[in-house]
Image (cartoon, rainbow, N blue to C red):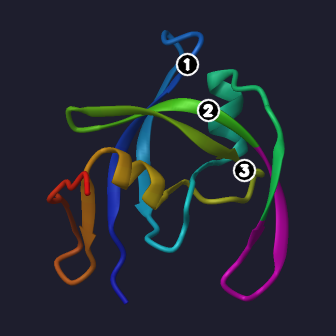
Amino acid sequence: MGMTNVKLQIKNLYDPEKIYTGDFLVDSGAHFTVLPEEIWKKLGLKSDGERSFSLADGKIVTRKMSSAFVKYDDEQVATPVVLGNKTDSPLLGVLVLEAMGLMLDPFQRKIYKSKLMLA
């Protein structure tokens, strides 16, 4: 199975001078974007709650949540993000892809603009 990585820029909603740019794995099975501890601490993000998540192996984990700006190419959206642990990987979830009007082509391992519909 191939993997797709993209370069994202993450900004603190309340302090946009705090910016992180790096590579994220596109995970079409993940709802939310995951920021490992090193990233969200650098950005100064604060938790606004917790959620429980089911992993691929069925294990349930709990992680804190926050919000941030996520930018890919020329598209930027404000979105909920998972405040990951030290060992969590940086992931781009489908919520951000959909908010930006983007889709993953898993065969070509590329992100492309999707057809947007209102009805």
Label 3 residue SS: loop
Q: Which residues are magenta?
A: 53-64
- Kind of residue at disc 2: Ser
Label 1 residue SS: loop
- Kind of residue at disc 1: Leu
Neighbour tally class for label 3: few under 14, some 14-19, many 20 plus, Cα within 10 Å = many
Where residue 23 appears, x then y in whole percent? Answer: 41, 50
Does the magenta-highlighted stretch encompass residue 60?
yes
Residue, disc 3: 84
Residue, disc 2: 67
- Kind of residue at disc 3: Gly
Residue at x 35% of width, y 61% of height: 5
Side of 29 where 71 appears, left or right: left
Where residue 102 appears, x then y in whole percent? Answer: 25, 55
Side of 117 where 86 appears, left or right: right
Label 2 residue SS: strand
Residue at x 42% of width, y 42% of height: 22
Please tell me whether residue 117 is drawn above or below residue 20 in the rendered image.
below
Contact between marks 2 and 1 (CB within 8 A): the answer is yes
Q: Quadrant of the C terminus?
A: bottom left
**Which tag, 1 or 3, sits closer to the chain's start?**
1
Query: Which sits in the foreground, 40 or 79?
Result: 79
Does the magenta-highlighted stretch encompass residue 42?
no
Residue, disc 1: 13
Where residue 8 appears, x then y in whole percent? Answer: 37, 41
Mark number displayed over residue 104: none
Contact between marks 1 and 3 (CB within 8 A): the answer is no
Cα gap from disc 3 to disc 2, whole angstroms: 13 Å
Label 1 vs label 3, nearer the camera: 1
Label 3 vs label 2, nearer the camera: 2
**Which tag, 3 or 2, sits closer to the chain's start?**
2
